[in-house]
Each structure stands twice: as C-alpha cells, then as structure tokens.
Image (tube, helix red, strand yellow):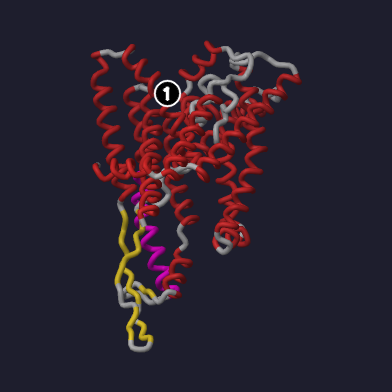
C-alpha cells in the first residue's frame, strides 16, 4: 500500500504525468457537464418512474455513463462506439486481410481499424437515437414532436455520442488509462452520492440481512477481481548460448507471464453492449403500426426481460467475449515466431509449431478460469436479486465489477508511466 501511494506521489511530482492526470480530470469534468444538459421537453417524473421500474434502463443508464438519468445530450454514452468496435473486431476474425492489417502492420493497422470503428459508430448512434426517441415518446417521457424537432433531437443525440467518443479517445491519447472505460467509470461514481442519500433515507432494520449480504458479496467481488486480474501463469523461457569470438552470449533464463484474465473488464462492457442493443431495437419495433411486427417485438422484449433468460445470455456472452478478446490480443503464433527469431525456447518444447500449440493450450486453460469467474460475478447479483427482490443489487454488482477493474487498470498505467520515467 505504501508503494502505491509513493508511486502516486511521484506521478504528481513529474510535470508530464501531472499534465496527463490533469487532462484526464478535465475531460471527465467536461463529460459530467455534458451529462447535465437535457434534451428539450423531458417529463422528469415519468422518466424517474421508467428508470426505477425497469432493470433494462437501469443497466443502460450505467452503460451510458449516467447520461440517461436526465436524458442528456450524451444519453447514448459510448455504447455505439463499443458496438462498432465489436463488429470491426469480429470482421478481423472473418477476413484474413483485416487480421493481417492488425497483426502485421502494427500500430498503423490498428489506427485504420479504429478509424473504421469511428465511422461505423455514427449510423449505429443514429439508429439507437431513433429507437430511444420512439420508445420515450410511447412512454410519455417525451412529447410527440414534429418532424423538424424530431430530426433536430436525433442529430443532437448522435452528435453527443460522437463527441463523447472523441473525448474518450483524447483521454486514451493525452491522458492516463482507457478513455472509454474511464467515462463509464465516471458515470458510475457520479451516482454514488445520490445512492448513499437514498440508502440513508430508506434505511430499515428489517432489511439488515440484505445489507449484510450485499456488503459481503461486494467485498468478495473486490477481492476476487483483484486476485484474478493480478494472477498469472509464468512460462519458463531460456535463451540459447551463442559464441561470438571469445565471448559467450545468451544462456539466460526468464519467463513469459500469461495473465489469467487478459481481457480485463472489456468482456463485461462488450456483453452489456450486445445485450442492450437488441432490446433497444425490439422496444422500438414494439410500437410500430404493423401489428405483426409489434407483437413479435413485444414478445421478444417480454421474453428477454425474464431475469433468468437475461442472466443465461449474459453469462454466455461474458465467457465468449473473454475468449474472443484474448484471441484478438494474444497471438501464440506471433509470440512463438518472436521467440524463435531471438534464439529463445521453452524448455522441453520444440520451437515453431510445437511452441505455438503449447502456448495456445496454456492460454485456453487459464482463460477458462478467468472467463468463468467473470461470468459468475456478472450474474451473481442477478441471482441475488431473484431471491431478495432488490433490483439495485443487480445494477450494483455490474457497476462494482467495472469500477474495480478500471481502478486496477488505471493504477497499472500510472505505475508504468512512473517506472518509465524512473529509468
């Protein structure tokens, strides 16, 4: 703990790091200011009733960084950008040219894919804005607008989402940490004062077992996330000896650290994005004039709002995205080739394809543990909600998982920046 505070103190003493931290804070403050600007004509009472009565909108409010709580101009949050990133990364797995673009061209290739994600996020934001406007009008949260006012609101909401995406990328480039994750983190933290006030106002001795259970689960989740995030499998690596003249080089032994959960909090964010987007579309279609389409959409919405159905899909998606994101970010073939080029090998394993298969087998096994842990933690609050009838537990568990993971990632980024400047 003392080492952490020492690193943070060194970060504030360094002028470059101080500017990065200051830029991150200012960007998050700007985001919170934008989240307080509502679109015109919002019925606050109906909006509050809708948010409190629907777990779907509660999750969506978290995912939008708190922008949905007052229908701000950034109500979509970074959801369209994340959905676009998922689509682009799926396409890299399907098309070899795009995969080569990411792995062979390095940073230039990743920048091209990020550009494609930004372009795709615009039509997704427009589609989401249309769905939201139609849904909110049907719930009497917004008045029925004319064509001009309707289009203006769509443009404003879409522009707000694009602006938030830009702020997130600026944080990643000029600040510290992942900008998208920090925006979601800031939205979650911003509602804490209101939640604490509501808890104090609604405190009841009869609910003490629920409070104690929630506290124990929160501590277990925090400890588990820290443990799984920090856990790693060390693969021994030995460098072959090379004789050059009268000197012998190499022969050193080191290890290759493979993390238990290399995807971090990304699978949770991806899974929420995939779960929320179909519900937005189905809610939109359930209010169209075509009775057949409306009935099918309403049936889908009712089916998906079942907490057990939602929990099963949530668990499967978290596990699947953990494997998917690990496969995207960790390439055993590339690592085996790099080891072979540098004259390194894993003891007892032949270089080349055998090393690739060995690393792939290890990553597959350890990722299973990390994926199952993330999936269980993600759905555990939903199970608790089913037995306690407390909706805030479901929302709070997901938020807690995101907050702990983002804080750990932020501390690592600060530590890396400080260590780099020490050297």
Which residue in the structure is indicated by mark 1?
191
| Residue 354 is covered by the magenta coloring | yes
From what the image shows, is residue 26 above or below residue 391?
Answer: below
- Which residue corresponds to the image point at 48% horizontal and 66% vertical from the top-left? 334
Direction bottom: furthest residue: 245
Is the residue 45 above or below the residue 178 in the image? above
**Among the 4 quarters of the image, the one containing residue 143:** top right
Horizontally, residue 263 falls left or right of residue 78, namely left
Could you tell me which residue is drawn at 30 percent across and 52 percent down?
231
Q: Residue at x 53, y 29 (%)?
A: 30
Q: Residue 214's spot in the image, x, y percent?
A: 29, 27
Left or right: 221, with 66 as reference point = left
For this view, does 100 lie left or right of residue 258? right
In the picture, the quarter occupied by the C terminus is: bottom left
Q: Quadrant of the N terminus?
A: top left
Looking at this view, is 251 or 12 the one in front?
Answer: 12
Residue 95 drawn above or below residue 217? below
Q: Residue furthest toward the right?
A: 148
């Amino acid at each position: 703990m003392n080492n952490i505070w020492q690193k943070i103190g060194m970060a504030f003493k360094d002028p470059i790091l101080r500017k990065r931290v200051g830029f991150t804070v200012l960007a998050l403050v700007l985001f919170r200011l934008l989240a307080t600007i509502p679109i015109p004509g919002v019925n606050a009472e109906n909006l509050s009733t809708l948010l409190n009565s629907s777990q779907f909108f509660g999750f969506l409010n978290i995912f939008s960084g708190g922008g949905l709580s007052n229908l701000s101009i950034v109500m979509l949050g970074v959801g369209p950008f994340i959905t676009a990133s998922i689509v682009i990364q799926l396409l890299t797995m399907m098309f070899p040219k795009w995969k080569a673009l990411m792995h062979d061209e390095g940073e230039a290739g990743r920048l091209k894919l990020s550009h494609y994600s930004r372009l795709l996020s615009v039509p997704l934001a427009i589609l989401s804005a249309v769905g939201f406007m139609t849904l909110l009008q049907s719930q009497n949260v917004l008045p029925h607008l004319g064509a001009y006012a309707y289009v203006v609101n769509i443009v404003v909401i879409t522009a707000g989402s694009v602006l938030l995406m830009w702020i997130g990328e600026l944080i990643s480039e000029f600040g510290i940490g992942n900008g998208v994750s920090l925006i979601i983190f800031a939205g979650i933290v911003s509602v804490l004062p209101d939640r604490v006030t509501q808890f104090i106002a609604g405190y009841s001795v009869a609910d003490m077992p629920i409070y104690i259970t929630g506290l124990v689960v929160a501590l277990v989740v925090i400890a588990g996330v820290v443990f799984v995030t920090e856990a790693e499998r060390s693969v021994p690596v030995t460098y072959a000896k090379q004789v050059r003249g009268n000197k012998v080089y190499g022969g050193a032994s080191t290890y290759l650290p493979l993390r238990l959960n290399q995807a971090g909090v990304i699978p949770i964010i991806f899974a929420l994005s995939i779960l929320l987007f179909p519900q937005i579309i189905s809610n939109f279609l359930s209010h169209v004039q075509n009775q057949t389409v409306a009935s099918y959409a309403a049936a889908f919405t009712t089916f998906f709002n079942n907490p057990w159905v939602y929990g099963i899909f949530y668990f499967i998606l978290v596990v699947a995205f953990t494997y998917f994101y690990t496969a995207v970010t960790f390439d055993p073939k590339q690592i085996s080739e790099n080891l072979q080029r540098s004259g390194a090998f894993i003891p007892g394993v032949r270089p080349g394809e055998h090393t690739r298969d060995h690393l792939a087998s290890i990553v597959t096994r350890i990722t299973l543990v990390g994926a199952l842990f993330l999936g269980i933690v993600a759905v555990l609050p939903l199970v608790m909600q089913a037995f306690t009838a407390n909706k805030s537990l479901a929302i709070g568990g997901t938020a807690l998982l995101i907050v702990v993971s983002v804080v750990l990632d932020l501390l690592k980024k600060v530590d890396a920046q400080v260590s780099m400047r020490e050297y």
